[in-house]
Image: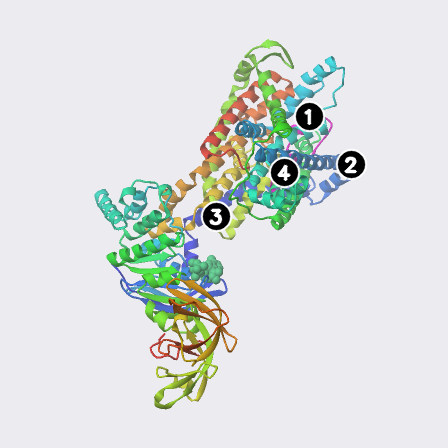
Amino acid sequence: MSVTITIQDLVKKYGDTTVIPELSLEIKQGEFFTLLGPSGCGKTTLLRMIAGFNSIEGGTIHFNERVINQVEPGKRNIGMVFQSYAIFPHLTVKGNIAFGLENRKLSKAEINAKVDDILKVVQIEPYKDRMPKNLSGGQQQRVALARAIVIRPDVLLMDEPLSNLDAKLRVDMRNAIKDIQREVGITTVYVTHDQEEAMAVSDRIAVMKSGVIQHLGTPQEIYQRPANVFVATFIGRTNILAGSITKAAGGSYALQLGSGYAEELSNIEVPRADAAANTLNVQISVRPEEFILTEDQTGMKATIVHSVFLGQNTHYFVDLASGQRVEITQESKASQILEPGQVIYLKVKKEKINVYDAAGDLNYTRGARL
Amino acid sequence: MRDTRKRFDVWTNISLLIFVFYILFLALPLFTMLFKSVYNGTTGDFSLAYFTKFFSKPYYLNALFNSVKVTVSVTLLAAIIATPLAYIMATVKIKGSSAIRVLILISSMSAPFIGAYSWILLLGRSGVITKFVSSTFGIQMPDIYGFTGILVVLTLQMVPLIFMYVSGALKNMDQSLMEAAESMGYKGLSKMRKVLLPLITPTLLAGGLLVFMRALADFGTPMLIGEGYKTVPVLIFNEFISEVGGDDGFAAAISVIVVLFATTIFLLQKFVANRKSFTMSALHPIEAKKKKGFGNIAAHAVIYLYTLIALLPQLYVIYTSFLKSNGRVFVKGFSLRSYQDAFSNIGGVILNTFFLAIVSLIVIILLAILIAYVTVRRKNALTNTLDIFTMFPYIVPGSILGIALLITFNNKPLALSGTAVIMIISFVIRRLPYTIRSSAAILHQINDGIEEAAISLGASQMKTFFKITLPMMLAGVVSGAILSWITIITELSTSIILYTGKTKTVTVAIYTEVVRGNYGVAAALSTILTVITVVSLLVFLKLSGQKEVSM
Ligand SMILES: Nc1ncnc2c1ncn2[C@@H]1O[C@H](COP(=O)(O)OP(=O)(O)OP(=O)(O)O)[C@@H](O)[C@H]1O
Ligand SMILES: [Mg+2]
């Protein structure tokens, strides 16, 4: 049955280098949980610790109430899908899928029934007796998935399962994976460095950097209220501007964005440590679509550098008065695209932008949480 | 925590067991040899007297000089001949090129001394070509004995090795590299020198090392065709075997010198090769194109001529095996008499050879699979040492290993000398690397994830190994095993030292018959050996689906 995975103060070291320092995390029963982060941040390492293929240098991993630190990988009742698929090339599709069942003291008939069921779920019935080399990438992927879930694992672990597929198939397969996971309801830990993929499939995402979780939340939370500047820049596109906030009446703050442009923000919460100061330097994350072009020459002055027409939207690269180049997105209009050299005035959607402390480590915006 | 426990699994025990095997049958013999070389049995003292003796007598130094001269010349010449051959085969469409590749391969698979003896029959003092040329043109052919003969025989034997190495490299070279060079104005020879040669240099270094070690170790060729031209293996053999005046300790000392020399060359090559190494893989491999006119004719002529010359010794031996003979001289007319004699007098050697080779092969396959697995998948200090051990047969010449085994296992508690066991051990130690190499190569291609997948599905380590890993490795194991097999049945330099009447092999029999002058019987036995070799080779090519063999 599906389990809750509780990770406490987990440490991973390779020799003297610590790859994961004291990581804690709870993955809920039946949840589709994704580890997302740049290359080398320790996603695979963490996944393989859960699987039992990597040693644990500190802390514990629980499956429900059971500590599994010392349990052999084969006894953890996990299903695993590898980036390389790891399909046994000398066994047929059926042979591959039945392999795990044959270790489980089932009768031939039971095994056959289970294999047939799962073939239907992943929709590769017609290929049952084929050898893997005669399957396409997507079909092999389905075999790998079927093989992992047919044993009814407590946990399904997937390490970049789609990275060997082409873009179109990647989208198809990620939907298929999501559907199948929902259908069988297994607690799933999914590793990817593709943020769009993570957004599309996950119930919750942990964004990692250097073995540390930077932000844990739903796709929406992570996109809209990134915990720090790293997460804001890693997820989606954004512009980081320098500015300051000054206390104003009624608990709100005045945000200075340069060139004399200011906005009053009512959703800023400065923690007590910083609250004494009247004015605080901040970093502001403004996504391209969070800029507004003003008609009345108010806001920040900017000059168009060049534009990219992408159909529904047009991207503009503009230079602010400070010299900083930022990217903005506007819905394409019927009228002419703005020309390079043209001067425009920008404001921001103040309820959408995020304001961080000067170091970029803490989100002052209300509604953001770690 | 778990890591340390995991390391002490079944595989640790297996590694340990194999380690003990190598300590006992490789490290201990080599150490014994070292010991003997500095120990004086009568006085019980340690001294460098044997080494002083070697380096103070021109007679011995001369042999060392001869060996170096032969080895270096053979290596260079083989590279100089093989590289253009491989390049022509890769770039020009040659009629029957697949067959030619197989024939070139076959020419390298026989024991070198058979080539030597055949060339004596062809070009020796009373050789057929010598006689023909002098009677028709009245010209005296140059002398084939001594340095020239050794050079010719060994070079022809070694060219195929470098040929295969370079062919392999050319196959991995992208056509566009050559085209890029041309687009930048490099043509003809300057293109070769600036682009082709640097790209195949790592390959030449690897092939060259292999040839160097084999030429250095070869004992049969200088013995037969060298006459007065003594090389070190001959010297060691004589010191060790001769009843009077022979000296084990001195033979051991010379062996130590050779092994040190070979090790130095080996390390030097590794050092240079490491700095020059890179990997290539071709998206669009170089294609053999149809050439026109003179170029085409010249290319065909060169290839066909070389193939003919390379095969000539074996063909001639086969031919003479069907001649009527009268001891040393062949007389007019054909007969199967030589075969009758071969079977009736010494038919036992064929059975011996099969028995020894098959038992050795079984042991080799078992060990190779396990060694390949632990060295690739369970890297630790122990398996790294194992990996180095398996490299030793590459450096230690066969005759030296034979002597080392003999002096180590001469007495109780492990008195193995004269038994089939010691023969089998020597075959296993020397021919294991082929099977290990090909098994390991295939294992490297098998993604780690495959085994982890099996384990995550609940299979035990042993079940994973036997049901998943082993079946996937099998192709590599089989192709390596066939190479081991071929090189066992053509082995001479160790068997000649270890054999007794009961464990005489075909190659030893051929050698002794040649020395005795029973050319007919020798030819018949050689032919039988050639047939077995060719059949094995064809099976290998069929099974591996390749046109090449990697040595
Ligand atoms: N066996 C190992 N020995 C030493 N260091 C290792 C080992 N395996 C991984 N590392 C290091 O641990 C860190 C995390 O590696 P990991 O494979 O978990 O990254 P990842 O997040 O999965 O990256 P990617 O997206 O590239 O797959 C990296 O810095 C890597 O160099
Ligand atoms: Mg990874």
> Type of residue at label 2?
Pro
Verify CB contact (< 8 Å) between mark 2 and mark 3. no
Q: Chain of mark 3?
A: B
> Type of residue at label 1?
Ile
Most prominent secondary structure in the magenta stretch? helix
Residue at the spot 52% in from the left edge and 42% down from the top edge: B284
In this rendering, the label closer to the viewer, 1 or 2: 1
Q: Chain of mark 1?
A: B
Image quarter (top left, top right, bottom left or bottom right) of the C terminus of chain B: top right
Quick check: B10 above or below B484? below
Question: Which residue lies under the disc numbered 2?
Answer: B58
Q: Chain of mark 2?
A: B
Q: Position of residue B196 (x, y in %)?
A: 62, 42
Mark 2 and mark 4: Cα distance apart in space? 24 Å
Q: Quadrant of ligand 2?
A: bottom left
Residue at the spot 25% in from the left edge and 49% down from the top edge: A118
Question: Which residue lies under the disc numbered 3?
Answer: B376
Question: Which residue lies under the disc numbered 4?
Answer: B213
Q: What is the number of the mark on residue B225?
A: 1
Looking at the image, can residue A205 be seen? yes
Mark 1 and mark 3: Cα distance apart in space? 43 Å
Label whose residue precedes the other's in the sequence (4 or 3): 4
